[in-house]
Every structure is written in structure tokens, then in C-alpha cells.
Image (spheres, grey):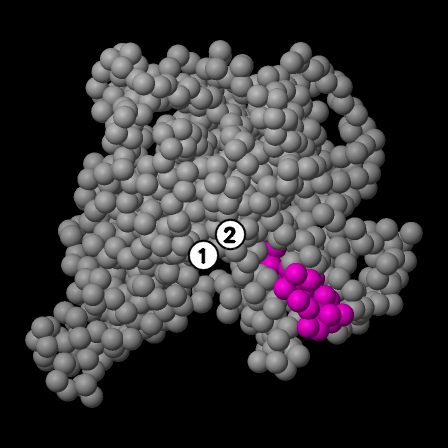
């Protein structure tokens, strides 16, 4: 018996009714390395099964939240195995069926899980050829695989289908060594853009999300919520709610809930609960949070240091000292958190809107005192995640309620609850001191980031005297160092990098302008990385960049970033209304080197999506709060990007087939803040140091500029 | 008030014995099992719960049963006829006009009612109409293209 699922390999094959199965290996992954070993430990689940009907079932612990990995993973398997996409069925995020996975985040699916999946498919192909060789009586080297058939090279009429090979076969293969992957030059599926495999379900309403799952006898739960984080329940009276027909009331510690077979009746019952709360004193609000963060964060820790900072300081012709700020930003996936649970004494099944099905399973097992093998987490489609669906607050609630009531229970957060319990992108501060020498080379880069974390903080540029420091203090989650933030914070699409790239690339522009140099030329002078130079040049070519010193009044800005193994350069054109301060983004060109591109249209969608979502944190999104009281509770006051905000976006994928596929979901969003800030400076001469650049802040900056 | 309420749903007659104050969104999703209509904000801001009533797009989270009595209601599940996708649905697939898919039902149905009234809208008219629907994944540009292409196809231009 395996520790993870209770299923043996033989059981798996029996359940499948025979076929060829490739299992996860014994800790040694094709992309060998210590990190990967830890990410993918021993597991008895399978990567893929070639069924006796010739269909291929692919199992992946990754989840589909819009980023397109349902399709791109199927493409990788189709490529390596030699079958058509239409012959593949995908099973995602089911902990009883899929290989263990840490979670879907960090743009890791293609670059970290992809190699394993491809290797598994390549292994299966070797097995298939071996079996076909026996069946056909032809040596393996004379066989080719095509569209689910093994064909004799010089006699194409002689062939055998995958289904025929699998029939009667009970072959299990453990992926324990490097399988030979197809070369980029031979790709026929990778590098093409088939339509999304989930598109048909999604345009017909058939696609199931967690809150769409129904079980007989299920109850909809509504939970009593505090008015602010840190509030303590002092008194509660549920008598009125209990009188309502069909209502089940649960009171266990701070968990006060009403449940009903009709969600609207449950809503009504919740309004009948009377509660008193003791509220904490608080003075924190969006304008004083930055001082608080700098003074209360843990001491700065060195991330990297080189050269002689002191000498560079002393010798600097001119020092540039800047401080940058960014407020809290919400995830607001259109689908709020939801979970459905069925719990008995010895078993639990949970459907959850989560980016981390396996850690969720382990969490549920601990909460209920069950062995992990008796807990199954199933992940339907997610209606967006963006890093915000790994804290599992709704799962913790639902398993308690299902256990107490002994009925299937759904917890689906309202939009107001979604805002309240979001794990926000933390407010943060970056302080930079830098200098340029007479040759236009950056001679000093002294960088300190507070509360955002280090992702994106490493300098892209060649600087001899440099130091990066970070004061984290923000382990993600509400429990850790709760005093630093008045509510929970957590990862948000490219965590920390949006702020770090905004600060660093703004500072680069400040220096370029002061040195009297074109911002593209200044970057190229100071950049050694050939991939980054190439994407900058590609973006400039596509945009039609003409050198000029900012502010040139044209409203052109440039920014670049290295994130998730991908190099990205973005150029923006903006117009700024000097009267009302409104920034209108006219055009964006984004060039990206992400290595081998599995699905170019899918990659472009991610770039467009990243840039569009980035318009939010750049122009408008900043949570309003008073201590632990969340003032924005819906889209009426918290505005996310609308159709009219979105500029023309052109995406250039810079070809680099020598590099394995890199991350695509996050890199583009990291440049949005910086590129627009730099374009605003180019248009107006106004330098914006705080995100979001609301119209009011732009107006204030205009006034300051005129006064100076 | 609890009473018998009749309406047509995706072409089929429906009679419900229910309080006429109840919200169409939850009736669809729980009692009638049509979960393609999504809850997004509960206040008629995001558009994920959009359905067609008569020939108008309505936010089902702000629509009570009383408002649909005797009317024809269509949800996303009723848009494809005889296993044939509506041109808008096909266009959303062809243009990759969706990512997570959670706003998609509402986007398609709001565009459906819009094109019914404005068969050949300009690009700007599409943008300004769709403005009232929220998408978080950033599929906006492709949604606009998909609606424009569907309008061309439906009016026989391409």
C-alpha cells in the first residue's frame, strides 16, 4: 500500500481495465536537481494511461484557472507520444488520481511539471514501440509513431493502433530515468495553437466550477462574519434564526453558521443572527501604512552584495535617491472562493476552488484527524486564481460544517466575503540610492525593499557596486507577524515583482533622463544579458522606437524584467490629460523570450491578460481600509480594469528554441506599472513614485511640478 | 408571496410554486440545475449572472421571479440550438475570447442582446456597451474581436 493514496499500481491498472500506464518515478525526475526532487516526491499515481480503446488519459496535479494549462499539457503529451490532441482526456487536480503536486503558481506548470509530463509521454512511446515491434515482427528502429498508430517506415499499410497494442496489455512502467524528448526541430504539436480544449464547455455553460457541484441533500452554509479583522465575538443570539423553518444552526467557538437547502433562505437566516463584537483600536489607513511598514518590518537582510558601496557613494558625481510606494491590491477572481464537502467518520471528499489541491488535502486530513489516503480533494475549473486561492479559508470552514452536520455542505463566499478574506498583495516600499558615472554606466545600486519580498529585486543591469536588501516580515498569511499588516496578505500574480520592477525600472529611467540619454540606449549600455538585450530590441523594433531623451512629450515609456525564467520588455504609449490627471494608455508592445513556446496563441493570451490586469494595480486598484476594517467590499468602489481601459496590445514572442519552455503567466504583468510610469514621465515630466497612479495623484504631482 | 409562477425557460414551459420575491439567479442555479449562470458580485455590477428575458439582457442576481412571470427566459444553456453553437459562441472559441470562463456566459448573453438591437455596431460601440461587464483574466481585446466577428457573420458580411 502506498502512503499517499492507498492504491497500488496493480489496483490502478485493474481499475483502468488494462492498458499501459506510466507512473511517477522514485524521486528522480527527468529535470534532475535537488529542488525538483523535493517538489515531486515518491508517489504511486500515474502520469498517463493508454487505454484499451486507444484513448490517452493524462493525470496532472495542476489546476486550470484560465491560464490554459489544460490545453498546453495535452499538447506536450500529444507531441511526445504521437497521438492527436482529440485522443487525449485530461484529469486535473484530483488527489486520488493525479501525481502529487505542490500547487499551481509561480508560472511553474510548463517549466517544472512540463519536463516530467513530456518524459512520461516519451517513455510511453518507447513502450508502445517495443510492443508494436513484437506484434508486427518488425524491429523498433523501423517503426514510426503517428496519430495514435505505430507504422512500419517503408510499408505504411502495415500498422497497429495504440488501442490494439493496449488491448490485453497490463504494462506498468515507472518513469525512473531520462527519457529522450523530441527535438524542437521535429515538433508538430508543440509550437502550434489549437483552440483551447476547455472552450466549448465554457461557451455553453457546461463547464463546472466548485459552486456548480450538487450532491443530494446538500446544505448551503452562511457564516457569521466579524465587522473587521481582529474583532472578538462577545455575545451571539441565534434564537430568531433557529425559528426559521429548515434552518440548521451551528455554534462551535467562533464558527457561527446557518445552513439551509435553499441558499436564499440561508442568507435570510444569517440576517437573523444578533451578535456583539469587541473591536480593536486602530489607526492604520492607506496613507500612513508605509511609515508603519518601514518602521515595523523585520530588520533589513542582505540578499546580495558586491563591490565597494562606500567608495561608490563617495565617488558618485550625482546620487539619485528615490522612494517608491504601492498600496494593497485585491485578487478579485470573478469566481469567489467555494468548497463542497462530504465528511464521514473515516473519510472526506472535498471539491474546492483551490490552486493547491494536495496541500489542501493534507490540511483537511490534519483538521479532521484522518489519514491523507482517506481524504480526496477534487478541483473543478477555477474562475481565476492569481495567487489568491491557496489559503483555503473556505475549505477549513466547509469541512468543519460538514463534519458537524453530517451532511454535504457548500461554503461559497459572497463578493463581500471575498474582499474581506482576501490575502491581499501587500502594501510595500522600495528605497533606492544609485549613481551613474561619466560614461553613462551605473556605478552604484543600493536597493532596499520593505514588505514586498525579493522576487524581481535582483538587478538586471551590470553594476559593480550593488546591494539588495529586503525586510520581509511578511510571511504570507494572517497568523504570522500579524502586527505588520492589519489583515491577511499573500502571493499575488508574480508576488513582489510588480512592485520591485516598478521601482527599479522607474529609477533606471530617472537616471537615463538625468544623464541626457535615451532610455532604451541607457538600458542597452548597462545590460549584459543577451536575452534581455534581444527582447528590448525586439520590442523597440515592433514599436518603431526612435531615440529621444525623456521627457520628450511623446508619452513613450519602456521597461523590462526577468521573471519565471522569461525575459520581457514592454513599451507603452500614453496620453495624460493635464486638467483632470487621467492617464489613457494608447498602445502597448510587449516582447517576450520564454524559450520554447508550447502554444503561441495561449502565450499571447497570458501576456495580454497580464498587461490588462496590470492596468488595475497601475492606475486604480488600492484597497481602502481602516485598520482591520475592509472598506471596499464590491466592484462599485473597488474598480478593476474595464473594456475602455485596454489599449491596443501587440505581443512579440522572440524565438528561442534552444531553451526549454519558461514561465508565461506572470512575466508580462511585472512591467506594467513601470512602463506606464515611465511613459507618463515622458509625456509630462511628472515622475510618479506611488502606485496606483490615480487621476488625483497625477493632478497633485502636476501642481507640485509647477510650484517647483 | 408563495404562488404558482409560469414562464418559459430555454423554450420549455416552467411552473414553479415559489415565493415571487425569490431571485432568479438562485432559482436557476439551485432548483432548476442550470449552473451556467454565475454569481459574481450579487449587486448587478459584474454581469456574470446575465440572462436574456424577452429580448433584453438582465442581471439575474437582481431579478425576482415576479419580473419574469409570463416571459421567455434564456440562459447560456439555451443559446445553442439543435447542437449547433450560436455564432457568438463559435466566435468566442475561435478568438480565444475566454480564459477562466467564469464571466463568459454573461459576456456572450450581454453581447447577444446588444447585437439583437445593434446588428452592425462599430468597434467603439462594442467597447462602450461591454464596459458594464467585468473580466479579471484580461480577455477584453479578444472578447471585442469575437463580438465584432460574430456581428459580421450574423449580418452576412463575412
The CA distance from mark 1 to mark 2 is: 8 Å
Judge if badges 1 and 2 mark residues of a common chain.
Answer: yes
10 Å crowding of disc 2: few (<14), some (14-19), many (20+): some
Which quadrant is the C terminus of chain A positioned in? top right
Judged left or right of residue A61, residue A265 is right
Judging from the image, mark 2 belongs to the subunit labelled A
> Magenta residues, as a range?
B101-126
Provide residue A318's location: percent of width, then percent of height.
35, 19
At mark 2, the secondary structure is strand
Task: Using the image, tell me which numbered label, if any, was put on residue A650.
Answer: 1
Judged left or right of residue A513, residue B13 is right
**Most frequent secondary structure within the magenta stretch:** helix
* Of labels 1 and 2, the one closer to you: 2
In the depicted structure, whether residue A503 falls above or below residue A11: above
Provide residue A636's location: percent of width, then percent of height.
71, 40
Q: Nearer the viewer, residue A257 or A17?
A: A257
Picture quadrant of residue A164: bottom left
At mark 1, the secondary structure is strand
In the depicted structure, whether residue A438 falls above or below residue A48: above
The residue that appears at 75% across and 45% down in the rendered structure is B43
Q: Nearer the viewer, residue B33 or A145?
A: A145
Q: Are marks 1 and 2 in contact (CB under 8 Å)?
A: yes
Queried whether the magenta region covers residue B120, the answer comes back as: yes
The residue that appears at 87% across and 54% down in the rendered structure is B20
Marked residue nearer the N-terminal end (1 or 2): 2
Residue designated by label 2: A587
Amino acid at each position: 500500500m502506498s502512503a499517499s493514496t492507498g492504491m497500488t499500481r496493480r489496483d490502478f491498472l485493474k481499475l483502468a481495465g488494462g492498458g499501459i500506464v506510466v507512473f511517477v518515478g522514485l524521486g528522480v525526475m527527468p529535470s534532475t536537481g535537488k529542488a525538483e526532487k523535493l517538489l515531486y516526491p515518491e508517489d504511486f499515481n500515474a502520469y498517463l494511461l493508454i487505454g484499451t480503446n486507444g484513448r490517452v488519459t493524462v493525470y496532472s496535479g495542476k489546476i486550470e484557472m484560465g491560464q490554459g494549462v489544460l490545453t498546453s499539457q495535452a499538447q506536450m503529451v500529444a507531441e511526445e507520444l504521437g497521438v492527436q490532441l482529440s485522443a487525449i482526456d485530461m484529469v486535473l487536480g484530483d488527489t486520488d488520481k493525479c501525481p502529487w503536486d505542490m500547487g499551481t503558481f509561480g508560472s511553474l506548470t510548463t517549466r517544472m511539471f512540463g519536463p516530467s509530463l513530456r518524459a512520461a509521454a516519451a517513455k510511453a512511446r518507447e513502450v508502445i514501440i517495443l510492443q508494436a515491434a513484437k506484434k508486427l515482427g518488425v524491429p523498433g528502429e523501423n517503426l514510426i509513431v503517428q496519430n495514435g498508430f505505430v507504422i512500419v517506415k517503408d510499408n505504411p499499410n502495415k500498422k497497429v493502433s495504440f488501442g490494439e497494442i493496449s488491448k490485453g496489455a497490463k504494462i506498468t512502467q515507472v518513469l525512473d530515468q531520462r527519457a529522450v524528448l523530441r527535438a524542437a526541430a521535429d515538433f508538430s504539436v508543440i509550437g502550434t495553437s489549437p483552440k483551447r480544449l476547455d472552450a466549448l464547455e465554457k461557451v455553453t455553460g457546461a463547464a463546472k466550477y466548485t459552486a456548480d457541484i450538487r450532491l443530494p441533500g446538500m446544505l448551503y452554509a452562511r457564516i457569521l462574519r466579524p465587522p473587521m479583522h481582529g474583532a472578538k465575538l462577545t455575545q451571539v443570539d441565534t434564537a430568531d434564526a433557529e425559528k426559521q423553518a429548515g434552518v440548521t444552526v451551528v455554534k462551535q467557538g467562533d464558527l457561527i453558521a446557518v445552513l439551509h437547502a435553499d441558499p436564499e433562505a440561508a442568507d435570510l437566516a444569517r440576517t437573523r443572527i444578533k451578535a456583539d463584537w469587541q473591536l480593536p483600536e486602530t489607526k492604520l489607513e492607506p496613507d500612513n501604512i508605509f511609515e508603519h511598514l518601514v518602521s515595523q518590518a523585520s530588520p533589513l537582510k542582505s540578499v546580495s552584495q558586491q563591490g565597494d558601496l562606500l567608495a561608490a557613494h563617495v565617488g558618485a558625481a550625482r546620487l539619485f535617491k528615490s522612494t517608491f510606494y504601492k498600496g494593497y491590491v485585491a485578487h478579485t477572481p470573478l469566481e469567489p472562493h467555494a468548497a463542497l464537502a462530504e465528511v464521514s467518520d473515516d473519510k472526506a471528499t472535498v471539491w474546492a476552488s483551490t490552486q493547491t489541491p494536495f496541500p489542501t488535502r493534507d490540511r483537511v486530513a490534519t483538521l479532521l484527524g484522518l489519514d491523507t489516503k482517506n481524504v480526496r480533494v477534487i478541483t473543478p475549473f477555477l474562475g481565476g486564481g492569481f495567487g489568491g486561492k491557496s489559503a483555503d479559508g473556505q475549505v477549513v470552514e466547509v469541512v468543519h460544517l460538514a463534519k458537524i452536520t453530517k451532511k454535504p455542505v457548500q461554503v461559497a463566499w459572497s463578493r463581500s466575503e471575498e474582499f474581506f478574506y482576501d490575502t491581499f498583495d501587500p502594501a510595500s516600499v522600495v528605497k533606492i540610492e544609485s549613481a551613474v558615472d561619466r560614461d553613462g554606466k551605473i556605478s552604484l545600486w543600493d536597493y532596499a525593499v520593505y514588505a514586498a519580498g525579493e522576487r524581481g529585486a535582483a538587478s538586471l543591469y551590470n553594476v559593480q557596486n550593488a546591494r539588495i536588501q529586503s525586510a520581509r516580515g511578511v510571511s504570507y498569511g494572517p497568523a504570522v507577524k500579524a502586527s505588520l499588516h492589519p489583515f491577511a496578505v499573500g502571493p499575488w500574480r508574480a508576488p513582489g515583482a510588480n512592485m520591485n520592477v516598478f521601482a527599479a525600472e522607474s529609477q533606471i529611467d530617472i537616471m537615463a533622463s538625468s544623464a541626457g540619454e535615451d532610455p532604451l540606449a541607457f538600458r542597452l549600455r548597462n545590460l549584459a544579458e543577451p536575452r534581455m538585450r534581444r527582447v528590448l530590441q525586439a520590442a523597440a523594433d515592433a514599436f518603431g522606437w526612435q531615440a529621444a531623451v525623456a521627457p520628450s512629450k511623446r508619452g513613450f515609456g519602456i521597461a523590462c524584467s526577468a521573471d519565471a525564467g522569461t525575459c520581457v520588455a514592454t513599451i507603452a504609449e500614453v496620453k495624460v490629460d493635464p486638467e483632470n490627471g487621467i492617464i489613457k494608455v494608447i498602445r502597448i508592445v510587449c516582447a517576450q523570450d520564454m524559450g520554447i513556446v508550447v502554444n503561441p496563441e495561449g502565450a499571447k493570451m497570458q501576456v495580454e491578460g497580464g498587461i490588462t490586469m496590470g492596468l488595475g494595480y497601475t492606475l486604480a486598484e488600492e484597497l481602502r481600509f481602516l485598520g482591520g476594517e475592509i472598506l471596499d467590499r464590491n466592484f462599485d468602489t473597488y474598480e478593476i480594469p474595464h473594456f475602455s481601459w485596454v489599449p491596443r496590445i501587440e505581443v512579440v514572442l522572440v524565438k528561442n528554441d534552444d531553451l526549454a519552455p519558461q514561465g508565461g503567466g506572470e512575466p508580462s504583468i511585472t512591467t506594467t506599472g513601470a512602463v506606464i510610469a515611465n511613459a507618463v514621465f515622458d509625456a509630462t515630466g511628472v515622475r510618479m513614485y506611488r502606485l496606483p497612479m490615480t487621476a488625483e495623484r497625477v493632478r497633485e504631482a502636476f501642481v507640485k511640478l509647477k510650484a517647483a | 408571496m408563495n404562488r404558482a409562477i409560469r414562464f418559459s425557460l430555454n423554450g420549455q414551459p416552467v411552473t414553479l410554486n415559489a415565493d415571487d420575491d425569490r431571485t432568479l439567479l438562485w432559482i436557476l442555479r439551485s432548483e432548476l440545475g442550470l449552473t451556467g449562470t454565475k454569481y459574481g458580485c450579487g449587486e448587478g455590477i459584474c454581469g456574470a449572472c446575465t440572462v436574456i428575458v424577452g429580448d433584453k439582457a438582465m442581471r439575474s442576481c437582481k431579478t425576482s421571479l415576479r419580473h419574469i412571470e409570463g416571459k421567455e427566459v434564456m440562459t447560456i444553456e439555451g443559446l445553442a440550438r439543435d447542437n449547433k453553437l450560436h455564432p457568438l459562441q463559435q466566435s468566442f472559441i475561435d478568438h480565444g475570447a475566454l480564459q477562466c470562463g467564469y464571466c463568459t456566459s454573461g459576456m456572450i448573453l450581454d453581447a447577444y442582446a446588444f447585437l439583437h438591437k445593434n446588428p452592425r455596431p462599430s468597434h467603439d460601440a462594442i467597447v462602450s456597451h461591454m464596459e458594464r461587464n467585468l473580466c479579471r483574466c484580461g480577455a477584453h481585446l479578444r472578447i471585442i474581436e469575437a463580438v465584432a466577428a460574430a456581428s459580421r457573420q450574423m449580418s452576412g458580411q463575412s
